[in-house]
Image (cartoon, rainbow, N blue to C red):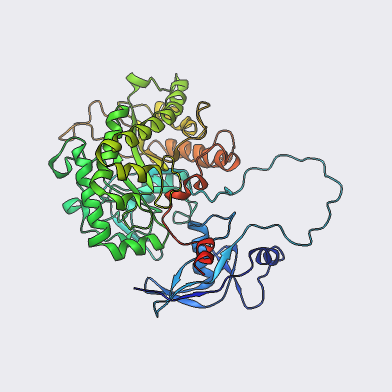
């Protein structure tokens, strides 16, 4: 369909000056985020039909600002009205106020304030994996979500705004109660009948957990990831294309399948097989099948890593070492793709427009200790999780954007035989002992010991969205629209 463009572009710095004074220019309104908080956007006050729902310019633009756009450059929000016209009525900005008064005497320094919200717009770095097949709960705004998210993640960590942009995320292994994940076991037919537009409670739609372990397509090797890629591209571009576009329109990201950890070359092969099965759509940021996020499961075996309450240094070394490993794995995957499909190799290196790419953002999923029964040893891992984000001195920046703590039952054997399995690893066990530890590690406020505070204070150290601009789903920005004019 060919859309007519109607553009209302405001002067960004004039808008900012007005916002500093607490008001928008005449004839415009200030945007609000999805929690109702004012954000530095002014726009024309028209209403639009988006996903069959009416939304005011101020509320919709604010939502886009909070979830998608950069706040240090002009970006246009995108609307489709009921007549099929594409309209871009707003810009965001980050300008100094005009007529700034000359500074007075420099005050004596007071105590260093605790870090505020991450200026790069980062969402919460922490998340929790909870037990599957829980009761489906419903929220008026967030839709269906697993009850175990509340019981096993949010309550133990004191998360009182679980559906806000900065909330600790939750992963429920698919099934009827978790619309934000596809699962080989908990969803019929690998979840291909699941409507992705129903995913509203989480900020990321996550694909299958270790397709090779679950024998997806009948394969127990890297071929399972090739099958996953083929299944995903059909799901996203044919079966649920319209619904995927709706999901993307809300700002939800998509993660590739949760990769089973392996030596570098083998892990790289799993990445390559998935992309080879999916083809160009998974590397094209204008496609509904585009994959913004890599996901990899990092379980720790104490006999190999020796991470424990009595040896926390090994927990730290493991975490920082995985940064180097992940970069090496991506480099190996790019090289391997050259032998399979040189065109896809080019897309792994650069966008269609020729913009150079590095490694995409990486989520560590199922991060936990195996073969461990003491809560103190699980806490040792938790207390050193920050080292996933404190950049290894040998590289420029960590590749990790988020970590999902494994807070579910460890089914390491068949027939409910739990001998040798991890125990006492759930956040709501032992009087929320680990829930409090995870909350402190993630949101404690100490910029040296807590992940979110550290990444807010060290934006050049942590992986931030500015590094992943070419791995973002393609929503046209102001610069692009001006060029088209």
The quadrant where residue 326 appears:
top left
Quadrant of the image containing the N terminus = bottom left
Residue at the (55%, 33%) spot, across then down: 449
Q: Is residue 307 above or below residue 468?
A: above
Residue 357 visible? The answer is yes
Residue at the (40%, 79%) spot, across then down: 82
Q: Is residue 441 left or right of residue 202?
A: right
The quadrant where residue 333 appears:
top left
Q: Find the residue positioned furthest to the bottom.
A: 83
Image location (x, y in percent) of residue 203: 41, 53
Q: Nearer the viewer, residue 343 or 257?
A: 343
The quadrant where residue 217 appears:
top left
Residue at the (61%, 47%) spot, across then down: 116
Residue at the (27%, 34%) spot, across then down: 269
Image location (x, y in percent) of residue 390: 52, 32
Q: Is residue 421 above or below residue 450?
A: above
Residue 409 visible? The answer is no
Image location (x, y in percent) of residue 314: 44, 21
């Amino acid at each position: 369909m060919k859309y007519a463009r109607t553009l209302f572009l405001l002067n960004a710095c004039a808008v900012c000056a007005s916002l500093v004074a607490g008001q928008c220019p005449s004839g415009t309104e200030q945007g609000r985020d999805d929690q109702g908080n004012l954000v530095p956007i002014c726009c024309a006050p028209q209403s639009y039909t988006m996903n069959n729902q009416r939304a005011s310019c101020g509320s919709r633009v604010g939502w886009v600002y909070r979830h998608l756009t950069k706040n240090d450059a002009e970006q246009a929000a995108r609307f489709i009205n009921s007549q099929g016209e594409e309209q871009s009525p707003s810009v965001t900005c980050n300008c100094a106020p005009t007529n700034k008064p000359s500074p007075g005497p420099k005050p004596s320094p007071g105590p260093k304030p605790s870090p505020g919200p991450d200026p790069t717009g980062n969402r919460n770095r922490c998340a929790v994996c909870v037990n599957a097949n829980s009761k489906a709960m419903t929220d008026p705004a967030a839709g269906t979500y697993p009850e175990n998210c509340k019981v096993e993640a949010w309550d133990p960590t004191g998360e009182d705004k679980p559906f806000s942009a900065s909330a600790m995320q939750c992963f429920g292994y698919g099934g009827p109660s978790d619309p934000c994940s596809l699962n080989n076991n908990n969803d019929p037919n690998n979840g291909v009948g699941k409507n992705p537009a129903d995913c509203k409670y989480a900020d990321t739609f996550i694909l299958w957990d270790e397709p090779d372990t679950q024998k997806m397509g009948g394969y127990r090797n890297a071929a399972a990831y090739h099958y996953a890629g083929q299944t995903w591209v059909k799901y996203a571009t044919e079966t649920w294309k319209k619904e995927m576009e709706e999901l993307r329109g809300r700002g939800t990201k998509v993660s590739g399948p949760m990769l089973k950890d392996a030596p570098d070359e083998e892990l790289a092969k799993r990445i390559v097989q998935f992309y080879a099965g999916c083809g160009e759509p998974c590397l094209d940021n204008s496609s509904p099948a585009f994959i913004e996020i890599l996901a990899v499961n990092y379980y720790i075996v104490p006999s190999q890593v020796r991470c424990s309450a009595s040896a926390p240094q090994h927990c730290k070394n493991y975490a920082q070492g995985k940064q180097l490993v992940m970069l090496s794995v991506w480099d190996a995957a790019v090289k391997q793709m050259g032998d399979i499909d040189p065109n896809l190799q080019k897309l792994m290196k650069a966008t269609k427009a020729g913009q150079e790419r590095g490694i995409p953002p990486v989520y560590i999923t199922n991060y936990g200790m195996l073969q461990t029964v003491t809560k103190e040893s699980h806490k040792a891992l938790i207390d050193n999780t920050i080292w996933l984000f404190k950049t290894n001195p040998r590289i420029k920046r960590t590749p990790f954007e988020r970590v999902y703590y494994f807070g579910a039952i460890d089914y390491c054997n068949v027939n409910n035989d739990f001998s040798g399995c991890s125990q006492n690893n759930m956040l709501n066990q032992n009087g929320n002992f680990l829930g409090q530890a995870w909350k402190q590690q993630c949101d404690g406020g100490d910029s040296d010991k807590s992940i979110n505070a550290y990444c807010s204070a060290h934006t050049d150290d942590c992986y931030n969205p500015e590094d992943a601009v070419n791995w973002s789903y393609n929503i046209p920005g102001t610069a692009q629209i001006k060029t088209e004019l």
